[in-house]
Image: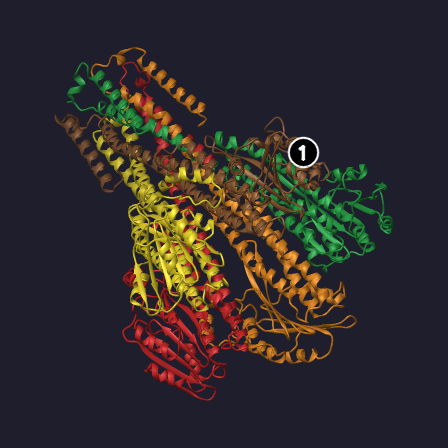
Chain colours: A brown, B green, C orange, D red, E yellow
């Protein structure tokens, strides 16, 4: 939650602006904005790393598929310039630079706007850091906006370079699908590493429940909630994309989108399973802690209870009455010790029979 | 909840009135009712602070957009007069002066009636005070009724004055949208300040759980519930407004309404996240309290348990039997002290090995 | 729940009857059945207190609106006679005299049958007593069946007498609406008085939690559940009435029904809020009780723990060994007392530093 | 749950059969299968107790309504013979002899198949035993299959014999409705007897909570869950029957089915109310048990705490130091007793003021 | 959860492949892939155990129904070859070899793809191992892919061999139905064996609650959750299959599918019942454990409390004051013993009257 603090000033500023005013809300994650592009069709393939908005806009006049990738969105002016060149609605521009968006799908007929959330999972603090990725799908181009350079899209790039799979033969809609697919794939990787951690923690909960364990459990709970909130709207988004009658989405892509939908459902399913496992662990922790405490209290109380009657007997013969016949008996002392032993044994046996020890 | 008391008499009175009888229900928050207006189009801009219902009604005959703002709704007669001049249904008048309304949307074909709830959040008592804002959207006018003078609409006013953004070029529907947008923006500000408070409290829950903490947690819970109840119907309201086929709402406004809808969903999402965080804190508080209690009990019981057998030994040699050989041994006393030490050490070691201390 | 006992015999009897056999199920709440009517239109107004079914039936041949009110439904024969005169279906008759009905809406084309539930709330036992009110809405008449004379409908009567509001100008559907409205108004009054009680109890939960408090909390819980069960079907009922294409309901009434619907939603909202508050109080009670118990246990255990080592020291110097050098030291006694004081102080300080006291 | 064991062998066998193979699954509840019939129309009425499938099939060629009742379904061959004579689908036959069916409705155009569940409630073990009743509704006949002879249908029989109510004038669909109605009536009787038991238990929970109470509460919980599972699908079934456009169901019956639907909703409502009451009792039991334990611990600990300082004082003056001036004071003993009394009183007062005793 | 570890490498690899690349994800459960087929119509029947993809493809040119069963899916090349021969979509191939699929239904017009999950239940560890079964339903063929040789389909094979039931007369859709039916039958068998285990555990929970019991309860909880997740999508799948307007599914099969649907609902119902029973057992375990602990604490504390005042009395007469008149009384000692007895008896009686012992 500490991340949130850095937004305060900006949100307040934004609140006083007219809607459609682009204003970066979020945490700047890199220095310079970098624009790169890939241009390809079945035969041709071209790639450039430091490009300008104007160059990119020009590219799109030909028929090849163009993928423009913008890394860094904190400079509103660059995003705005791109927006103007590709005639993107002011509200879309505003959304692109506001990193608090939920995953969403909007069809502006001339282009489709998709918000994705990549997740960066840190095993040590069990924390998810979201990165917002905006995808603009146009007739023959896709523009992606990332908060910082990242490698989640590298497999897609690789496939374009090598011409493996369908990607070079298909249109911009298939490229957009591929990007969404690689985001969902990254969720699977996160789930696997969380799965391993949960497995490890399960043993710890039973064997050595400590106050920190409960914090850990809550951290996992929260991570899963976060993931759920991220994936649920994505699922909806895919349905909307598949159902959309936009001419930007070819019919042949829809079988892939259905497949992607299935994967998303699988992610949600796994998240739900983990949530159940975690909430089970919470129960186990509580009953494990109370079990240990009960153990402590029981053993200690038993020891105390055995000695209390013995101490009483010792107290009786510590009284200073002048006339106490037992005191003069030669074996009085040893008889008393014997009686004490008998009482102690009897109590131990009684506790044993009651199965308390 | 103390606020409620002040309503009693009025609700009872209202119950015996025929439906459609305007009767102020709520707490009077200012003295004098004040009517102000703004009139504008792309070129023209005019503003007046102390106006009368009649003057306002006349303004609306021309083609400019007119925004009439009424501050103070406790004087039913003024609201009624306005109602008559703008031919507003008696039930709408009744709703305007009843501050117990939920956010709602009603399409009376000649005008649209929208109830909004502004929230005033006090950090010190973690309490939300709602203020009801009624919006009447007509062909070329918007009438707003506020319970008291407030500044949530100031950014909109500022934009009208400066002619920044679309607002001066657009119609009354865009004005209504802008007002709703500024209400939703104010929710974000509240959520931010609550977010900070929750963050602070999280540490306190773990480090120094006190009985007051649980009250605080409940206060946050309630504030979030309140907010949720306020925002859910707003979401619905926006959908109805966008979907409505009223000719009062221009098609070009609907992309803005969809954007506003997204913001509302974001608010709901954040509220839900906070609710989860708060309910997690409740769990943490309980387990933190029981942990501390367990600690106390454990250490104290351990001390007691170590001394009980020792006290027993001392008791034995405090007995007054005439024949107790050990008493006469020259080293009996020191041997006994030694045995006591051994017993104590043994118990400490045993507890250590069992990981109880 | 004690009320239920009185039904046993009758339900069993009813079970062996063919469907459509009217048989009073419930608790007789008055002696004599009393039929009264009001007849009115915009100009005319007439009222009679002791009427007969036949007289009432005749009235309805003219064009005025007639409201027939039957107080007491335990005499099946009178209800049946009315049923025959107004050609009401046998199943409706059966439902009218069975006070276990839920609120429901049935459209028999020639009339509409509406079941309402008035609630009688007793502050002292926090108990809701339902009273079933059946409303038959015909072309120009409304028949209401009440279990006992009551005053919830008095404001409506008053309005008819004075000709205030729309009621004298409108038809039988508006009368039916007014009756439903007055029932919903009575719910608001109940909620207000419960609200006050809950407010009072909140302080008690924190300051002096007692075993009875938990019973009280459960009583409130149950009252709210009861209310919820009563109001939810009413909400549905109003929707059905508004949506119904029956020619008995004039279009102009539907804006009033929508308003009534909003009020019902407000009731439900308040009930839900109270349910949350009450369940919060349950949590607070539990944590308040466990807090007090912890307090007791902690202070007592601390006192015990301080004295146990001291008693041990006293025990040591109470031993009767012949050779115990300290015993002969002139200042042995005072030194020992001093050591005891030091030990006690040390423990108090330790507890203080650990923040246990 | 013990009842289930008797099924094991049969389910396994069934699993290896082709679908549509009738195989009795359940517990045989009677010896001989008995077929009886009633034949009636408005004027005629005939009844026979020991009939054969063939005789029954022949009866149905005339126009009277025929009700064939089969008691005992463990003999698959008889059910199959009937099935063939009335051309009933193999899957229906399989369902009739499988007592694990849920209530369901199937429209096979030439007949309608309805599964009902009668419940046998035993107050002593708070256990529900279901009995499956299959109803085949044909053009002019109804065939019912019961697991054993029972009296739930007796009121219907009686009405046919006496010609009371509509039944003799109506068709086979009204007969099927009457049978369903008598099943729902039997649910009401069960709910009443459970209601009484719950009422009794409520007092016990508060006054003498015992470990068995919790088992009882769970038994009630389970009984209510069982009932809920039985009635929910019945509700659906009735809707399907009413909505079905089968020509076997006359339009005039649908008002009765709607009434039956209302009764079913009432049953569900009562079940839900009881579930809430029971879960409230669970809470009360827990807080009542912890209350009693707290009481015990508190009083005992207080006694212990008062005596610990006193015992310490006694210990001090039991020390054997040679120089202890107080020991020689003539009033030392009584002064010490006095001090002990003062300490004890002080502690009692302190506890009183803290409201711990 | 340990099973999951074996997937890690493969999922990561898969994530970097273009969609539609078949890559086995799962645990290899057998050595060699084995292809077998059955070919039949009403008169003819043929079966072969070690076949090749090519041979199978050729078979399907004639009109008989062909069932091709592939055991082992870890060899992607064989699955791919089959896919090409039967023109199956690349994404289907990918899904077949990915054992992490949920049950799903996809209609590719020329064939229908169904994913089933067989469950292998181990009573000793209360663990479910899923096995994925893919079913391809074509015009006159069914291809099934199993992870390993299994016997769940044996009853179907037997019926084809013997020509029992409808199977030989019906088409490939009926075969697909039969396979699904046998999977659902296998769920019933699992539920029965779990039912027995739960019944056994219920007694243990009350009589000897041990820390392991809670782990067992959680294992059952998880198994039921797993089963629920498996059966819910199956239910949906059957609805989609029945509702599908594919010409591959004959209308006469739909009554069987409805029947299968009912069975699935029965499975879900039983799973839900078990879940309720298990969660009830959790409550019982907790209250049983706390009950035993209370017992222990109570008895022990009572013993301690009785002896504390007695020890105090003994302490008083152990004091060494020179002037203590009682000490010199001849019967002082016995009187003191008597008083101790009286005090002890009084306390026992007091505890008895308070019903604490």
Q: Residue furthest left?
A: A330
Residue A269, image x and y in percent?
46, 47
Chain at tag 1: A
Establish if A307 lies above or below E34: above
Q: Nearer the viewer, residue E293 or A198?
A: A198
Q: Nearer the viewer, residue D85 or A342?
A: D85
- B159 with respect to E236 (left or right): right
Establish if C126 lies above or below D27: above
Residue B216, image x and y in percent?
55, 37
Establish if A316 lies above or below B160: above
Q: Secondary structure at mark 1?
A: helix
Residue A225, image x and y in percent?
50, 41
Q: Residues within 10 Å of mark 1 (few under 14, many from 20)?
A: few
Residue C325, image x and y in percent?
25, 12
Establish if D187 lies above or below C312: below
Q: Quadrant of residue E5?
A: top left
Residue C288 in view here = no
Per the image, the residue denoted by label 1 is A55
Q: Quadrant of the C terminus of chain C?
A: top left
The residue depicted at 76 percent of the width and 65 percent of the height is C162
Q: Nearer the viewer, residue D236 or B71?
A: D236
- D236 with respect to A137 (left or right): left
Q: Quadrant of residue E328?
A: top left
Q: Residue furthest top?
A: C330
- How many marks the image carries: the answer is 1
- E276 with respect to C271 (left or right): left
Q: Residue furthest bottom?
A: D43
Residue C92 in view here = yes
Q: Nearer the viewer, residue A301 or A204?
A: A204
């Amino acid at each position: 939650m500490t991340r949130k603090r850095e937004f305060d000033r900006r949100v307040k500023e934004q609140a006083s602006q007219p809607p459609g005013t682009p204003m970066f809300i979020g945490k700047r994650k890199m220095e310079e904005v970098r624009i790169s592009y890939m241009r390809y069709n079945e035969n041709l393939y071209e790639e450039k790393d430091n490009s300008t908005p104007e160059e990119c806009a020009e590219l799109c006049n030909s028929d090849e598929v163009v993928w423009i990738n913008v890394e860094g969105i904190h400079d509103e002016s660059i995003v705005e310039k791109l927006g103007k060149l590709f005639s993107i609605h002011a509200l879309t521009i505003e959304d692109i630079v506001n990193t608090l968006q939920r995953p969403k799908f909007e069809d502006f007929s001339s282009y489709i706007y998709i918000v994705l959330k990549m997740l960066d999972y840190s095993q040590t603090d069990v924390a998810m850091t979201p990165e917002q990725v905006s995808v603009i799908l146009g007739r023959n181009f896709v523009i992606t906006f990332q908060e910082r350079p990242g490698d989640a899209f590298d497999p897609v790039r690789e496939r374009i370079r090598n011409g493996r799979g369908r990607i070079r033969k298909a249109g911009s809609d298939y490229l957009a699908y591929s990007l969404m697919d690689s985001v969902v794939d990254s969720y699977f990787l996160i789930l696997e590493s969380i799965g391993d951690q949960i497995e490890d923690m399960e043993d710890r909960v039973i064997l050595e429940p400590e106050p920190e364990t409960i914090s850990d459990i809550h951290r996992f709970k929260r991570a899963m909630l976060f993931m759920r909130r991220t994936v649920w709207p994505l699922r909806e988004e895919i349905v909307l994309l598949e159902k959309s009658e936009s001419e930007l989405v070819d019919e042949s892509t829809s079988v892939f989108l259905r497949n992607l939908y299935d994967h998303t459902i699988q992610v949600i399913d796994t998240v739900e399973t983990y949530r159940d496992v975690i909430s089970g662990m919470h129960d186990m922790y509580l009953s494990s802690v109370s079990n240990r405490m009960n153990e402590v209290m029981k053993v200690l109380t038993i020891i105390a209870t055995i000695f209390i009657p013995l101490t009483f007997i010792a107290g009786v013969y510590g009284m200073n009455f002048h006339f106490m016949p037992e005191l003069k008996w030669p074996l009085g002392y040893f008889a008393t010790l014997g009686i004490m032993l008998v009482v102690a044994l009897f109590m131990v046996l009684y506790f044993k029979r009651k199965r308390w020890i």
